[in-house]
Amino acid sequence: MRDLNLPRKFNAAEYFVDRNVKDGRGNKPAILFEDQQVTYHQLAENVNRTANMLTDLGVGMESRVMILLRDTPEMIFAFYGAIKAGAVPVPTNILMKAPDFLYMLNDSRSTVLIVDAMFLPEIEKILNQTRFLKHVVVCGESGHHHNSFEELLSKVSTEFKAADTTCDDVAFWLYSGRNPDRLMGAVHHHSHMVFCAEAYAKGILNMNEADRAMGSFLFFAYGLGNGVYFPFAVGATTILISHAPKPELFYQDLIKFKPTLFFTVPTLLGALADYKKACRQENKGLPDIDSLRACVSSAEILSPDIYQRFKHEFGVDVLDGTGSTEICHIFLSNRFGEVRPGSTGKVVPGYRTRLLDDDGNPVKPGQIGNLLVSGGSIASAYWNQREETRRNMRGDWFVTGDRYMVDDEGFFYFRGRSDDMLRVGGKWLAPQEVENTLDQHPVVAESAVVGCPDKDELIKPYAFVVLAQDQSPSEDLETEIKQFVKDKIAAYKYPRWIEFVDSIPKTAGGKIQRFVLQDRVRRK
């Protein structure tokens, strides 16, 4: 276990924000966003303003504050402002829908919601059903009857004394989607961000104050580390991107902002490689990207093909790794001079792993086992989910639900899940949720969903659908059903393929035999 030597009295906002000002970096850019530049001094002032604003709204120690913001400076102000006030920010997946937001608001008992004006229509749908929410603070456009983030900040002081927290106090929650029935709040502490920064940002990436880190989706554990606390741990600069993940736009960002580290996912790496290749073949000149010293990939498995395509086009190594919401960031990683395409790398120093068979016995190298991880950044509990906590957080060890094989050299290879969960675009997906949505369509009698690799070997939902009597399959009907799902739940969850079948294979007890369907997809 890595010893952080943190004092008992400790506030993460002071460590990641105020410390940089005290160390003489006040005039250095902390955040680059579109045409904005926020220095460390300005960051500290806005964090203090946010802490004062929240205090004025009645937020106290351990109060939850839900954050539903795009990747903007305001998201970082809100996150650290809540922490500095001793409250608990809950960064929330902006891709979800109104019912998910309602569940998380009520489950977390958040009294304040800080929301981007873009997402206000979804929130308005469920406001009258919230049980604990007292204040809605909106970032962006006016024309609403709620509090304005910008106006509230303009009225408060730029000074704020950090709450009297300890390194063991709760700092933030991240909702995990690993349970197919409900989202669960993973509880993280003030020391966890420091542990991840020391173990991975410094230990693997050798991050330093000369780095410029570019990533996206700050509401995920992966994005939160990449863009919100890794750069500030070393006095570096974070680059925030809030537009759609289109390769042509990201290529422009790479040129404009000149990042040294690019944190992304395999889907975008493949799209960028294809974009650059297509432009070259069409004789469309693109400026070279010469600032990168490395790319980091996580959230879904990076195939050797995408790795080779990206490295061929950009000439930069991709350090693939794996992490989880509960572990806070990456705990298995490839590293400089030691990249093994197809592998998620070796154990990050500071963490320990076990691979166990289904009876709890250790497996040998070359055999597949269930992965358990121990380290100083593991969530202490799932909020209000005692049974799930007991089942998955066993003393020092966290049960990841992943199945891995490790070779004689210590490289880990992902070999699937021990449950039915799918990881699509870095986000957990429960097949049952997609099935329940499909079954709501009036022409669908029943359905079953499994994972299917696309052309880049990235997993996407594949649906088997039994139609109601007197209904006939057609391309138009397939398109209609896909759109129906998109409208009901988060868009990344819709089935990319629909196969109309006469029946769904089931056990004698009526449980879907997913392995039969998975085998059918594999043979295709």
Image (cartoon, grey):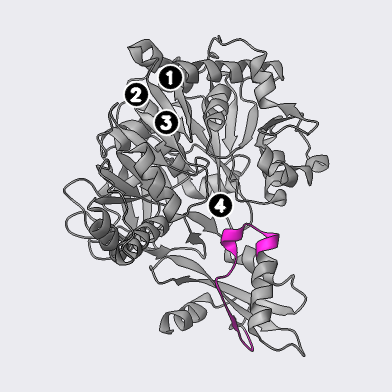
- Picture residue at 55% right of the left edge, 78% below the top: 513
Q: Which residue is mark 3?
A: 229
Q: Does the residue at mark 2 contact the one at mark 1 (Cβ under 8 Å)?
A: yes
Classed neighbour count for the residue bearing mark 4: other residues with Cα under 10 Å, few (<14), some (14–19), many (≥20): some
Q: Which residue is mark 1?
A: 40
- Picture residue at 42% right of the left edge, 65% below the top: 458
* Image-based side of 481 in relation to 291, left or right: right
Instruction: Indicate the position of residue 173 as horizontal and vertical percent values.
Output: 55, 36
Label 4 vs 3, first from the N-terminus: 4
Spatial separation of the CA atoms under disc 4 and disc 3:
23 Å
- Residue closer to the observer: 390 or 25: 25
Label 3 vs 1, first from the N-terminus: 1
For marks 3 and 2, give the one nearer the viewer: 2
Kind of residue sitting beneath label 4? Gly
Classed neighbour count for the residue bearing mark 2: other residues with Cα under 10 Å, few (<14), some (14–19), many (≥20): many
Asked if residue 308 is among those painted magenta in the image, a careful observer would answer no
Asked if residue 489 is among those painted magenta in the image, a careful observer would answer yes
Q: Does the residue at mark 3 contact the one at mark 1 (Cβ under 8 Å)?
A: no
- In the rendered view, tell whether residue 339 sits above or below residue 291: below
Query: Regarding mark 3 in the picture, which secondary structure is present there?
Result: helix
Q: Which residue is mark 2?
A: 235
Q: Quadrant of residue 312?
A: bottom left
Label 4 vs 1, first from the N-terminus: 1
Q: Which residues are magenta?
A: 486-503
